[in-house]
Image: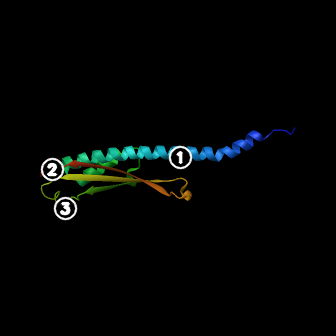
Amino acid sequence: MKSDRGQAIVEFAMVLPLLLALIVAVVLVAEIGVARLALEHAAAEAARTGALTNDDDLVRATVAAAVTPLDPKLVSVSIDPPRTQPPRSGAPRGSLIRIRVRYVIPVPLGFVGLPQFVVEGAAARRIEWVP
């Protein structure tokens, strides 16, 4: 019978890539989940701010403050309708303001075909602000 020395290290070397891939996948899914929750919260808070103030600068500041675990510089905000277009430019009370926020998460193993994930959050509120 031959010696079995080194068998455990060979088996570990064969399983190690699978374990590392699994760990990377779990971390990536957790990061996507955290980003999704933060963006939904930020969109809801920004829509509330927009409904009460009708001010785009305050909406963007609210998003920046509400996406705490994420980098606010990497979050893009779109406000629909824009401040200069009706109904927001006239008497906006009762019309909808829609906020959409986007965040791009780079994939650490982008060479496998997924260079990035785009996570979005959206919310809408009726405008209560009166000019």
* Label 1 to label 2: alpha-carbon separation: 44 Å
Helix, strand or loop at mark 1 = helix
Q: CA distance from mark 2 to mark 3?
A: 15 Å
Q: Is residue 93 left or right of residue 120?
A: left
Q: Nearer the viewer, residue 60 or 124?
A: 124
Q: Residue at x 53, y 59 (%)?
A: 113
Secondary element at image label 3: loop
Q: Residues within 10 Å of mark 2 (few under 14, many from 20)?
A: some
* Front residue of 45 and 113: 113
Residue 9 seen from this side? yes
As measured in the structure, the alpha-carbon distance from the residue carrying label 3 to the one carrying label 1 is 44 Å
Residue type at numbered disc 2: Gly
The mark closer to the camera, 3 or 1, is 1
Toward the front, the furthest residue is 1
Residue 118, position as x, y percentages in the image: 42, 54
> Horizontal placement of 3 versus 28: left or right?
right
Q: Upstream in the sequence, badge 2 or badge 3?
A: 3
Residue 62: x and y, percent? 29, 47
- For disc 3, the neighbor class at 10 Å (few under 14, some 14 to 19, many from 20) is few
Identity of the residue furthest to the bottom in this view: 85
**x, y (%) of residue 12?**
70, 42
Among numbered discs 1 and 2, the one appearing first in the sequence? 1
Can you give x and y, in whole percent of width and height, for residue 128 in the image? 16, 47
The image quadrant that residue 20 belongs to is top right
Left or right, 17 with reference to 34: right
Residue at horizontal 20 percent and vertical 52 percent from the top: 96
Q: Which residue is mark 2?
A: 94
Question: Disc 2 on helix, strand or loop?
Answer: loop
The residue indicated by pointer 1 is 25
Looking at the picture, which amino acid does disc 3 mark?
Gln
Residue that badge 3 annotates: 85
Asked if one can make out residue 65 in the rendered structure from this viewpoint, the answer is no
